Image (tube, helix red, strand yellow):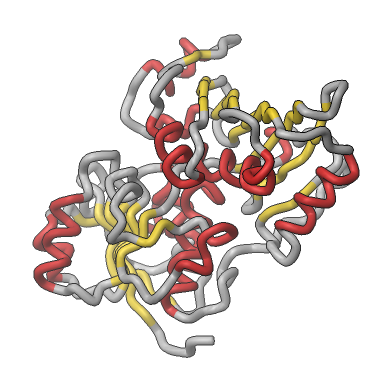
Amino acid sequence: MSKQKFTLGIVGARGHTGTELIRLVAAHPGLELAFVSSRELDGQRVADHGDAYAGELRYESLDAAAVAGKGADVVILALPNGKSAPFVQALDEARPDTLIVDLSADYRFDPGWYYGLPEITRGDYAGQRRIANPGCYATAMQLAIWPMLEVLAGPPQCFGVSGYSGAGTTPSDKNNTELLRDNLMPYSLVDHLHEREVSARLGVPVEFMPHVAPHFRGITVTVNLWLTEAVAPDWVRARYVQRYAGEPLVRVVEQAPWVSRIAGRHHVEVGGFALAPGGKRLVVVATEDNLLKGAATQAMQNVNIALGFAELTSIPADKENSDG
């Protein structure tokens, strides 16, 4: 395990994920928060926007050149899709050894970047300094589908529901609490970015239908899987248990997990395992906190792997659900 101290900067720190990243970095014994960039909060103390960080560091409005000039060992880009390229280019030119973790979708399809879903891709990491963090929905979908990949008879169908924090802080219908009250809002019902992401990563077509709900955080994905052969419930559950043995951030549960039990927690829950008569149709449910395992927690896993720390350094252990 690394004993070295590394500096880390966050670009796009105003958002919900940025807040969670600051909390994880502040708790990390091997990381020092070097800068946090936010146009909207420029000049304000980081400590005034949460209880995780107690220093005098202030938010700064930094362009790409200024970020590269900070000389941080690690830069996490928590920006909207389509905004990362100038920062990556500036760091490529000025500091190519900087570890970059990009939380947007900008580099998830780039073969030159490591795709950091550790439970599935950990063995593919070979010292890359450019890491693409998976999407929140894409994380839950892949972890639900992956153990059954070899026995799929057709495209998995995924019905997803997210809390409105997944829509970010920029005002839109999808984070308008008045429009969401007593509502379930479908959107991007075909060709969603995460549908393409999961299809590309798993090598099979995946169908995804996302919705946003009135709760703030947490996503649930119900996945319908048609199988090539009839299977038994015990075989299915044993397969998931075996695939995720030794993975503390994936918890296999008997019942279909509830999204209300995952908010503020760092792991994914996968369960339900309902088989239709005949044993060839399986329904699996996965839940996660979209801001944590769906974003900040996974970014910290990737940083820890790349820097040689224990993978769960600064990631709190979740207590067991009494109903799990």
Q: Is residue 250 above or below residue 279?
A: below
Residue 114 is drawn in which quadrant?
Answer: bottom left
What residue sits 52% from the left and 21% below the top? 209
Q: Is residue 73 above or below residue 213?
A: below
Looking at the image, which residue sits at the far front?
229
Q: Is residue 30 above or below residue 120?
A: below
Between 136 and 224, the residue placed more toward the observer is 224
- x and y percent of residue 170 in the render? 31, 29
What residue sits 39% from the left and 16% below the top? 173
Question: Where, quadrant-wise, is the N terminus in this rendering?
Answer: bottom right
- x and y percent of residue 172 in the render? 35, 20
What residue sits 64% from the left and 63% below the top? 316
- x and y percent of residue 294 in the render? 52, 46
Question: Where, quadrant-wise, is the C terminus in this rendering?
Answer: top right
Q: Is residue 56 shown to the viewer in this render?
A: yes
Between 51 and 189, the residue placed more toward the observer is 189
Q: Is residue 243 above or below residue 174?
A: below
What residue sits 19% from the left and 73% below the top? 96
Q: Is residue 264 shown to the viewer in this render?
A: no
Looking at the image, which residue sits at the far bottom?
3
Give left or right: position of 1 versus 75: right
Q: How many marks?
A: 0
- x and y percent of residue 205 in the render? 49, 32
Between 104 and 107, the residue placed more toward the observer is 107
